[in-house]
Amino acid sequence: MNPKDTCAIAGVGLTKLARRTPGVSSIGFTLEGCKRAIEDAGLTKDDVDGLLVVAPTQAGERHGWATRIAAYLGISSNFTAAVECGGATPTVMVQMATMAINAGMCHTVVCCYGWQNNPVDVPPSLPPGLEFTLPYGDLAAIPFKAQIARRHMHDFGTTSKQLGAVAVAFRKHANMNPNAQMYGKPMTLEDHQNSRWVVEPLRLFDCCLLTDGGGAVVVTSAERAKDMKNRPVYISGWGQAHSAEFMSPWRDPQVKGWEGGKAADQAFNMAGLTRKDIDVCQFYDGFTILVIIELEAYGFCKMGEGGPFVEDGRLELGGELPSNTAGGLLSEGHTFGMAHIVEGVRQLRGECGERQAKDAETAFITGYGGAPHEYPPTLSYSTLILRR
Amino acid sequence: METKFPPPVPTPTEDSQPFWDGCKRRELLILKCDACGHYWFPPSVLCPKCMSMNRQWVKASGKAKVYSWTIFHQLYYPSFADKIPYNVAIVELEEGPRMHSNIVECRNEDIYIDMPLELVWGSKLKILIGTCPSTSQRPGNRSLSKPQKENEMSAVIYEKKDHIAIVTISMPWMTR
């Protein structure tokens, strides 16, 4: 059975997104995100019978995370799990919710996350699994993306200014979004070029923000969604591709085509749409280089042409492919990509005011995650196609 | 008295212990599949190409080339404070596998993709594995066999060949 349009997103919600919000726990942010999404759908918690949540990887080994969130929320759930796919998790959770609803396990699933960067109950520590990276001074998410960026520059002539074009486009959009962390802080290409190196060839403004916050979306059957408060936003297609392509231990890795392409092909086949049918995109943009890679992987341009593609405002509102219209991870806040789904839904409902993409009927939303600093370094691509 | 923050110590797993034991003997070990001949890294119990569990640790030639490289300008771990800006590269071994490394005896701005490299070992049993350019590529064509003062990496010894590699896993437990 093709699950196209069998389910819909009926409610979305985000908390305040800020660099530092002490006094709220990860669970606190998660619960507030759930409340906002459930209320946005015009539902009560008793209408929800499933819950998926992003696994709190910064908090070490935490048992029963999803079940506890459900208990704090006061719901009796038939379907609950903590999901760990890095930045691909929110899109993956929406896919899983749709599958569970189609399997008859439940009818309404809240997919949520919450993140406190400095949890008072968790002492700072290094995760295990760093034996082949940390001894060289390599740590965290940025360096591996810098390696990919360097190689992309070598193979295709991609430039730092092209990376900057991505950052500038999304900052423009953030300045039309009062909930964005970088609202009121414009950025020019010159600002980008003058920003300090973090891990060369990535500059400070090539890297996403650190954000305390939470958010959620409510997935329900298309049948139920018809009678709910909001115009339903249908889940028309999705796909995933998981790889270790940059340092694959099982084959000769060569940059011929990104393996993420499969995630888009699955989604477009399911939806019966083509790239040309997409009105607005929300690309997982943990780093500027990722957007360039995703444009290539997902077939919006050819391999190696992502750099030139992002020039001339093509990703900006009014451009050929308006993307990350709320500012993205780079300028709205790091929400693991939950805000990408939220913004996709709001665009299709036509709620976005100044930053509304004209006549948006279809949205392409991506997640991108993995374990870049543990061996083997992995990459997870995930996609959603939504329509109104 | 020096109060330097200690460098990170690799924490082996059951699967990788032989690799680190090999480093103590100054052998760069990777796994080779008995069934299909595939070489792989990081260490694991089966061949990621054919799933055979018949495998053996073999010494890599130590010849490698730069696949990609970066320069760290931001401090991520305190013991690297005096090394900033330092490079971290992904190097591709002649046998195929890729791994992280630091390239030493080479200015950061002289690194390039496909730069030939060769493995050398630290003489003080303190620092290990890494990569550095071939003799002909080295600035001033200087020999690495004469350690330079004030340069931790110059403690490296190596078999003199066309290429060299280098160094830089600090492993305090190796001094025991």
Image (cartoon, rainbow, N blue to C red):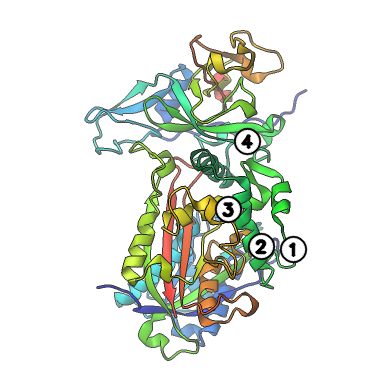
Label 2 with label 4: CB-CB less than 8 Å: no
* Picture quadrant where residue B123 is located: top right
**In the rendered image, which residue does mark 4 sit on?**
B71
Q: Is residue A119 visible?
A: no
Q: Which residue is mark 3?
A: A288
* x and y percentages locating residue A55 in the rendered image: 49, 60
Disc 1 to disc 2: CB gap under 8 Å: yes
Q: Could you tell whether A275 is left or right of A40 in the image?
A: left
Relative height, residue A367 to residue A161 (above, below): below
Residue located at (42% from left, 26% from top): B93
Question: What distance separates the C-alpha of mark 2 from that of mark 4?
Answer: 26 Å
Badge 1 or badge 3: first in the primary sequence: 1
Same chain for labels 2 and 4? Say yes or no: no
Residue type at tag 4 = Ile
Question: Could you tell me which quadrant the C terminus of chain B lies in?
Answer: top right
Q: Amino acid at mark 1?
A: Lys
The one nearer the camera, A246 or A167, is: A167
Residue at disc 3, secondary structure: helix
- The residue that label 2 is drawn on is A171
Q: Residue at x 65, y 77 (%)?
A: A354
- Chain of the residue under the numbered disc 1 shown in the image: A
Are labels 2 and 3 on one chain?
Answer: yes
